[in-house]
Amino acid sequence: MAETRSPGIPRDLAERVRLVIFDVDGVLTDAGVYLGHTESGEPIELKRFDIVDGLGLHLLVYAGLRVGIVSGRVSSANRMRAEELGLPYHEGPHGHKLVAAEAFLAEENVGWDEVAVLCDDLPDLPLLKRAVLPAAVANAVPEVQALACWSTTKTGGRGAAREFCEALLRARGDWERVLARYTSERDAEAALR
């Protein structure tokens, strides 16, 4: 049976992608930041990440794509989530994401003509202008939406990244293969118990 392709992500662009970069605040989170401190005065930062987004990022890795997280904000919560997912994380303080993204591309030996990005706000504009596949979450600012060649129907931190991952894999023709691999590994793990 032929796989259904995402009508919104052009297949020719999807097939060029080797590296996918995800923004954090407003994309992998709902953009909320909870700040506080312990009784001894140590700072605490909390954020809400959607678990289904993490699985989506892992499915891209299953497909053989390189995946990373880039933020323009120095954040222990972001580093913790990237570490939990086993993904590279780069941060550029004061909203300077391009420097962080350029370092990531250099590490991966990838050019912008092989990069997809999922973003939401003004600090993301330099990345969107360079990526071969610029994408936006549903609640992205108008300037980001204007540069995106595809947008999610879900908002940031509420499954938007997972939606993008699946759409990208479907556009590449990889969805069925990746899903079969994922489920067969889970079946094999269950059989060992």
Image (tube, grey):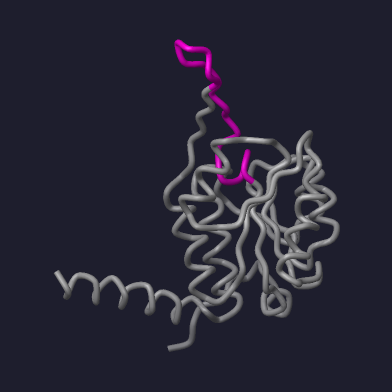
Q: Give the x, y percent position of residue 157.
A: 53, 42
For residue 132, side relative to residue 6 (left or right): right
- Which residue is painted at 48% across and 36% down in the image? 48
For residue 49, side relative to residue 132 (left or right): left
Q: How many marks?
A: 0
Q: Is residue 73 magenta?
A: no
Give residue 75's quadrant in the image: top right
3 in relation to 35, above or below: below
Q: Give the x, y percent position of residue 135.
A: 70, 57
Give residue 133's quadrant in the image: bottom right
Q: Is residue 33 magenta?
A: yes
Indicate the quadrant containing the N terminus: top left, top right, bottom left or bottom right.
Answer: bottom left
Which residue occupies the foreground of this view, 68 or 83?
Answer: 83
Which residue occupies the foreground of this view, 114 or 92?
Answer: 92
12 in relation to 51, above or below: below
- Which residue is painted at 55% across and 48% down in the image? 154
- Which residue is painted at 49% across and 82% down in the image? 3
Q: Farthest residue to the top: give it.
A: 39
Q: Give the x, y percent position of residue 168.
A: 60, 69
19 in relation to 74, above or below: below
Q: Which residues are the magenta region? A: 24-43
Which residue occupies the foreground of this view, 113 or 158?
Answer: 113
Main secondary structure found in the magenta portion: loop
